[in-house]
Amino acid sequence: MIRCLAIDDEPLALKKLATYIKKIPFLELADTCQSAQEALEPINNNMVDAIFVDINMPDLNGLEFVKTLQDPPIVVFTTAYSEYAVEGYKVNAIGYLLKPFSLEEFKEVAEKVKNQYDLIKTASVSTADADDTIFLKTEYKIIRISLSEISHIEAMSEYLRIFLDGKTRPIVVLLSMKKMEERLPSSTFMRVHRSYIINLKKIREVSRNHIFLTNDADIPVGDLYKDAFNAYIASKFLSK
């Protein structure tokens, strides 16, 4: 599922956008925001994969807002003014919706979002070596890590703490959760909280929205990630 954020200062337009997102099977509405400032937290915490943002908003318009983002997600602009279309593509927007847009028009843009998302995922998986290793810079040196050694990853402000099997101290690297999530194969790793990525093969037990790993780590499941994690568990569940 592609986690989406809808941003529009007009309540009716925001409601319509949220409704359209919910109608697309591969899109998930992560949240709605009525200002660029309100949208900063979920974006900076890497809680979304794509944003549908209105250009004409008070204080900070959508174009200027996207330009301020260091690592923006996939961007689709919405506006009632066609003259903004060219400007929208200058900031690498994947799509542009001119209000009032129909569900069919929204579906066309949604397909572009999916194609871009799939390209990003394919590229990120290929960054792992054939022998399932990655290189990370930490403490003025570059080290090689086997993906199978990773138990879980925790976000700490601008840094990540990577916990490895058999190691008492985590490896600390200057890297965003979004970048790390993109580099790890989704078949083995899953983000279950805005601050945690886990190795699915290390799960020992699941209880009351908490995941207990083989190294006894207790990992909470965030509300935004609960459905995806429960779907994974359901796909592996064995019953009579």
Image: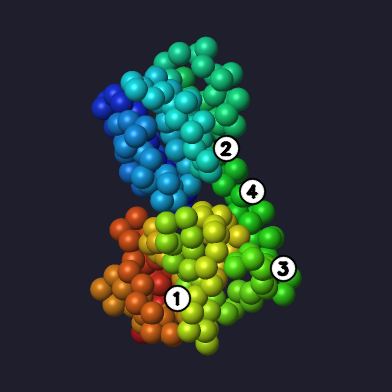
Residue 113 placed where, x, y %?
54, 40
Residue that label 1 marks: 236
Q: Which mark is residue 129?
A: 3
| Most distant residue in the bottom direction | 166
How far is the residue under mark 1 from the one under mark 2? 31 Å
Mark 3 is surrounded, within 10 Å at the Cα level, by few (under 14), some (14 to 19) or many (20 or more) other residues, namely few
The type of residue carrying mark 2 is Lys
In the image, which is nearer the foreground, mark 1 or mark 3? Answer: 3
Which mark identifies residue 194? none
Cα–Cα gap, marks 1 and 3: 27 Å
What's the mark number on residue 112? 2
Horizontal side, residue 184 vs residue 101: left or right: right
SS state under label 4: helix
Q: Earlier in the sequence, mark 3 or mark 4?
A: 4
Question: Which residue is rendered at x = 45% and y = 13% of the image?
Answer: 81
Which residue is at a point 48% across and 84% down the rendered structure image? 168
* Label ID, residue 119: 4
- Residue 56 in percent (x, y) is at 39, 19
